[in-house]
Image (cartoon, rainbow, N blue to C red):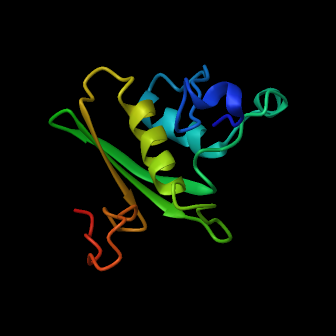
């Protein structure tokens, strides 16, 4: 994620594409794990920050062209603002949709599907 007025109009969510090398045996899992690690030292020098806020990948599977992803909020991690859950979801979706065979992405955090819901009264939807 990159901040600053220069990127605001081109990248409204602050997300910025970076190139990384992934494990060829499990490229989607590898890409999502790398995403959750955060920026490299070189990327930090270019003012890139994490879009995953300390969240860690638990599992990923593809079924019927849908990538089902499951993450946990690690101890001490927290969303830094009300838009952060949506930035996280978008980062996961953009990462997963790069892979052939993935047409849809389901993002689950701590067993909850609607963790980014703006409806405070909506009951949590459990992930399947």
Residue drawn at 27 percent across, 64 percent down: 127
Question: x, y (%) of residue 114?
Answer: 32, 63
> Does residue 72 appear to the left or right of 107 in the view shown?
right
**The C terminus lies in which quarter of the figure?**
bottom left
**The N terminus lies in which quarter of the figure?**
top right
Q: Is residue 11 above or below residue 68?
A: above
> Does residue 126 appear to the left or right of 49 in the view shown?
left
Number of marks drawn: 0
Q: Is residue 73 above or below residue 26?
A: below
Residue drawn at 71 percent across, 41 percent down: 49
Question: x, y (%) of residue 113?
Answer: 31, 62
Residue 9 position by quadrant: top right
Q: Can residue 26 be seen?
A: no
Residue drawn at 42 percent across, 32 percent down: 94
Residue 10 position by quadrant: top right
Residue nearest the viewer, comparing 114 with 29: 114
Q: Can residue 17 be seen?
A: yes
Question: x, y (%) of residue 90?
Answer: 43, 41
Question: x, y (%) of residue 109?
Answer: 42, 62
Residue drawn at 39 percent across, 65 percent down: 115
> Does residue 64 appear to the left or right of 81 in the view shown?
left
């Amino acid at each position: 994620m990159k901040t600053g007025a220069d990127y605001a109009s081109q990248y409204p969510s602050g997300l910025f594409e970076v190139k990384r090398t992934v494990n060829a045996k499990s490229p989607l899992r590898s890409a999502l794990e790398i995403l959750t690690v955060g920026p490299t030292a070189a990327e930090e020098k270019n003012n890139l920050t994490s879009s995953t806020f300390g969240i860690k990948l638990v599992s990923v599977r593809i079924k019927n062209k849908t990538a089902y992803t499951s993450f946990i909020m690690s101890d001490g991690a927290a969303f830094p603002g009300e838009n952060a859950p949506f930035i996280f979801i978008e980062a996961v979706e953009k990462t997963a949709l790069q892979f052939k065979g993935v047409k849809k992405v389901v993002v689950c955090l701590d067993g909850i599907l609607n963790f980014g819901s703006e409806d405070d009264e909506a009951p949590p939807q459990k992930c399947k």
